[in-house]
Amino acid sequence: MQDDSGPSAWVPSEDGRAFATVMEAEKAAAAGDSGEAERLFREGIRLYREAGKGVDHALGRYGAFLLKEGRLDDAVAALGEAMEMGTDLGAIWSDYIAIQAQCHDMSRMFDTFDRLPPSVSEYATITDWILPYVGRAVRAGDLEYGELLCRTVRDEAHSRNEMSGAFKAVGQHGQILEKMGRLDEAIDEWQSAFDAGSDDPTTVDRLSLVLDRSKLYDEATAVIRTALERGFRANTEETLRKRLVRLETKIAPGTPKTDVPVFSVRGGNAYASLVMQRRFSPPIRRIAIVGTTAYCLAFKKDDGILTRVDLETGEAKTQGGLPQFDELRVLPSGWGIGLRWVGRLGKGRSSLAFLDPVCEGCLYRRPPRCALTSCLRRRPLVHRLPERPALYLQPQGEAALGVGDAGS
């Protein structure tokens, strides 16, 4: 029977209060109030224990807080308790391995990986979990530890028959040896892995490059030709093909240079062929293709740069000084619209202008109303939308920008 005496206060469940308390602890930590964060984390853990579930979540967040505070022993205790509960929260296991990496305890790192529950380790390999800490050690300048850890990962992956991971570790290990001045060892390791069928981009890139620099042009050419048959990523293949063209001119001076496609054909040789290509600097961030025209938008500092490219002739026209749009749409008539999100939805006002060729690039301002009705009447409209400046691109390359408050 419903009680009509008045609305009653909502009382959160035990785990609801626990969750809210941990969130408050997170806020206190973010604000730099470590003492209050510590108190709230402990209170949240207590509430979760009373609720009888979710304790591993609270311990994991508390452990992450302690890790940031540099309290490694306390973090190990909190995370270890959650792990003993059989938690399937990957972040807890990852933070625990991160601590062992900081402590240079490789044995415990690998032991922890072997303890991962199936739901966490199902799609992960030992190189996925451990190899990132090699890069951190190298960036920190600790080449000796980075080399030892990378070599250990390589050997562990090989012993587990994870050959792709082992090849990836070889590529990184060779780079470390190169940094340490042990280039001959790096070349030997890269060459052995490549001969064994390595599919690691770093290995083939560095091996072919050092052979080229050593003027071993035939050897470098052989490596690249073999690599191009293994199906590397398109950007890796582009680099290799360019290097191959340069090598061919070194082997046979006078050999004419050819355009190197920046794409790779996976569906058969007849699927696509290079007709014309153009490299942009700065690189393209947005593109719209309408008919035989490509509208290419690039960013440089705070400016957007639009280049219209005729795909039949290769002729290009560039216009700068535009906003850095998040979206670019162009109609067959040549009219276009660029949208840029500059703030959270509902925070502040900007104008979105709907124009057609009759307007000849002029903005006509009026109070917001149905955009569809106004467009059908072939009349321009400035329609107020939250935080959406708009640029309209005319076929001749002119630009009109509708900004400001439509309500003014």
Image (cartoon, rainbow, N blue to C red):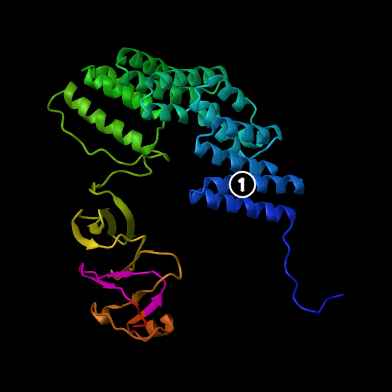
**In the displayed structure, does residue 397 sit left or right of residue 336?**
left
**In the displayed structure, does residue 340 sit left or right of residue 397?**
right
Please identify the quadrant where the C terminus is shown.
bottom left
Q: Is residue 231 above or below residue 2?
A: above
Question: Residue 255's quadrant in the figure?
Answer: top left
Rendered location of residue 126, percent (x, y): 54, 27
Segment tinted magenta in the rendering: 383-404
Please identify the quadrant where the N terminus is shown.
bottom right
Q: Nearer the viewer, residue 39 or 148?
A: 39
Judging by the rendered image, the residue that carries numbered circle 1 is 39
Rendered location of residue 185, percent (x, y): 35, 13
How many other residues sit within 10 Å of disc 1, few (<14), some (14-19) or many (≥20)? few
Q: Residue at x 41, y 27 (%)?
A: 137
Question: Residue 258's quadrant in the figure?
Answer: top left
Q: Residue at x 50, y 35 (%)?
A: 70
Q: Amino acid at mark 1?
A: Arg
Q: Nearer the viewer, residue 149 or 46?
A: 46
> Magenta stretch: residue 387 in it?
yes
| Helix, strand or loop for disc 1 | helix
> Magenta stretch: residue 295 in it?
no
Furthest residue toward left: 254
For the question of whether residue 122 can be seen, the reply is no
